[in-house]
Amino acid sequence: MTTAFEPVTVGRYTTRNRLVMAPMTRNRAYGPGAGPTELMATYYGQRASAGLIITEGTQPSPVGQGYPNTPGLHTAEQVEAWRRVTAAVHRQGGLIFAQLMHTGRIGHPSLYEEELTPVGASPVKAAGTVFTMKGPKEFVTPLPLDSAGITETVDDFVSSARNAIEAGFDGVELHGANGYLLHQFLSTNANRRDDEWGGSIEGRIRLTVEVTRAVADAVGADRVGLRISPANPFNDIVEDDHRDTYLALVDVLNRLGPAYLHIAEGPDTEFTGLLRERWGGTLILNPFTPGGYTGPEALKLIETGEADLVSFGALFMANPDLPRRLRAGGPFNTPDYTKAYGGEHDGYTDYPTLNA
Ligand SMILES: Cc1cc2nc3c(=O)[nH]c(=O)nc-3n(C[C@H](O)[C@H](O)[C@H](O)COP(=O)(O)O)c2cc1C
């Protein structure tokens, strides 16, 4: 029986265990320039015993930013600043991928240093509000990307992936989940296009496919992962045909051969098994845990073969030495969600380790 504490191949790498730190936005990249700080290097360094760390969502371009104080990977200064993060993880033999997150219509003009409007598949405003420095604001109607805008967006993903490698990251995860730009294109409510980037399933998966292909061409498919969240309605997403859509996407991914597929599981948990069967590569699973968070019971997903690796969000936030605690059967610190977004050391780098 395979256990979560055994190595596994992820693209060109072999991880030291099958426990992944899930991407978590923490909004602590303060100051102009949206570069990671020393404190962020400490935070990621503390969690280097993960088999793989996936960073918080990182914008590939200024307009790709959807929340205050999230870091970017589109300037030379940001590349330089990320080096201390990747070095802190590598010093301890860890692996770290940068999550490239373009938030699309989930954003607000007040977030940007220059005058910009969020972009999207179609001029369809998301229901709800966005968190800004001036409190919650209604989402705005995004500017639909024209074909030049789509080319530019794909290029932004490519150049930020190159920047990630230059900054010392082992690879990148493309954020195709949770209602952000790629997911907006995959959906049937945010994407109302009738050109080759919408309409049919083939059209709606095209942007995710093209971004994956282009980034794989630039940095190697074995350094690129993709995160998806089929049937997750977060950020006002509707998917009328999620099963057919994601099976079609996986059929193309099988030909592109990225390092892994990362499923942020939604309410259709049965579908995960179908994806597992259809996808020929490495699978990271973040199981569906409504009203709670992924705990030690998820280790059995590795033992049953339902996943190759399991990712933990909240539990990794609260337990810097999570692999050790999982092996020991606990105890576990409790995550404090009130300190998740923004702030300083408190609730970020001060969760104790077992022997502290
Ligand atoms: C504070 C916080 C921030 C998050 N930010 C991101 C993010 O930037 N990108 C992403 O793909 N998912 C993000 N997520 C979702 C997590 O990766 C994960 O899917 C979710 O927390 C459920 O897993 P869990 O039950 O192990 O916490 C975030 C979750 C939390 C709690």
Image (cartoon, rainbow, N blue to C red):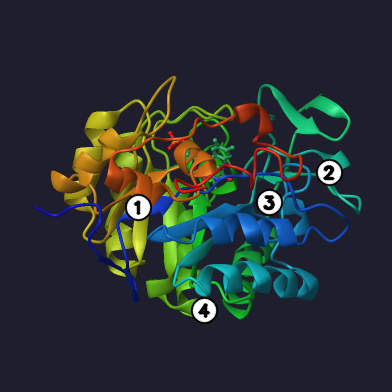
Mark toward the viewer: 1 or 3: 1
Q: Nearer the viewer, residue 229 or 246?
A: 229
Which of the numbered marks, if any, corresponds to residue 218? 4
Q: Earlier in the sequence, mark 3 or mark 2?
A: 2
How far is the residue under mark 1 from the one under mark 3? 37 Å
Q: Secondary structure at mark 2?
A: helix
Question: Residue at label 1?
Answer: 19
Instruction: Give me the residue at 68% from left, 54% from top.
Output: 146
Would you name the residue on which mark 2 appears? 111
Depth check, mark 3 against mark 4: the one in front is 4
Q: Secondary structure at mark 1?
A: strand
Identified by mark 1, the residue type is Leu
Question: Residues under labels 4 and 2: Cα distance?
Answer: 29 Å
Q: Secondary structure at mark 3?
A: loop
Per the image, the residue denoted by label 3 is 145
Does residue 216 lie above or below 270 as drawn? below
Label whose residue precedes the other's in the sequence (1 or 4): 1
Sequence-first disc among 1 and 3: 1
